[in-house]
Amino acid sequence: MSFKKKLGMALYRGLAMHLPRSQGGLGSAYRAVRAFFARMALDKCGKNVNIEHGAQFGFDTSIGDNSGIGINAILSPGITIGNDVMMGPYCMMFTSNHAIGDLTMPMWKQGHEERRPIVIGNDIWIGARVTILPGVHVGDGSVIGAGAVVTKDVEPYSIVAGNPAKKIGSRLAEKKE
């Protein structure tokens, strides 16, 4: 990892993520500072991004144009976020899980499974407190309802909700009416 990325991540975590929310008053200035340091740390950081107060992200993360990471979101390394993605507060995305396969050893000693990247397509709305688990691909144009736990891929233009998340509608069907 380059020195620039390490410096960007250190400055983001030490300063920028703690700046107040992007709403009202100096909000646009805080947003710009967070984006500046995020641009140094992320693999790719598009134009007009909004990384909110308290948001944490890992290395090997990319975010497209006009997309945001919600307030106090936690994103593991290895996540790709497309263009025009809205993310509510307190979302969590994990690209690896604890290993639990060896019954002769306590789980805490087994380490983690291999990382499986998460891919968030374009034009997605992710509601508040959504959890997305390792290896999930969210198709373009989808909506994920607040509080959903996404364990499987989401088809393009789907509306999913619940725990575990299930398809409850389609934006394509609504478009026909």
Image (cartoon, helix red, strand yellow):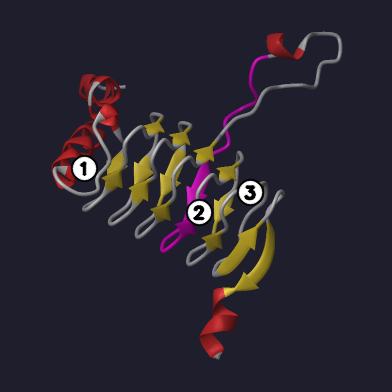
Q: Is residue 37 left or right of residue 72?
A: left
- Across and down, in percent, residue 91 comes to 50, 42
What is the C-alpha distance between the residues marked 2 and 3? Answer: 12 Å
Secondary structure state at the residue bearing disc 2: loop
> Magenta residues?
111-127
Q: Can you see residue 155?
A: no
The tag earlier along the polypeptide, 1 or 3, is 1
Which marked residue is nearer to the observer: mark 1 or mark 3?
1
Q: From the viewer's perspective, is 165 left or right of 13?
A: right
Q: Which mark is residue 137?
A: none
Q: Residue at x 22, y 53 (%)?
A: 48
Q: Residue at x 39, y 31 (%)?
A: 56
Query: CA–CA distance between discs 1 and 3?
Result: 28 Å
Hey, which quadrant is residue 36 in on the image? top left
| Dot 1 amino acid type | Arg
Q: Is residue 76 above or below residue 27?
A: above
Q: Is residue 115 magenta?
A: yes
Specify few, some or many for label 3: CA neighbours under 10 Å numbering under 14, 14-19, or 20 or more.
many
Q: Which mark is residue 31?
A: 1
Circle 2 residue? 127
- What x and y, as percent, mark residue 109? 70, 8
Tag 3 residue: 150
Instruction: Look at the image and tell me in which quarter the C terminus lies.
Output: bottom right
Q: Residues within 10 Å of mark 1 (few under 14, many from 20)?
A: many
Q: What residue type is disc 3 on?
A: Val
Answer with mark 1 or mark 2, whichever residue precedes in sequence: 1
Find out whether residue 86 is within the magenta segment: no
Label 3 element class: strand
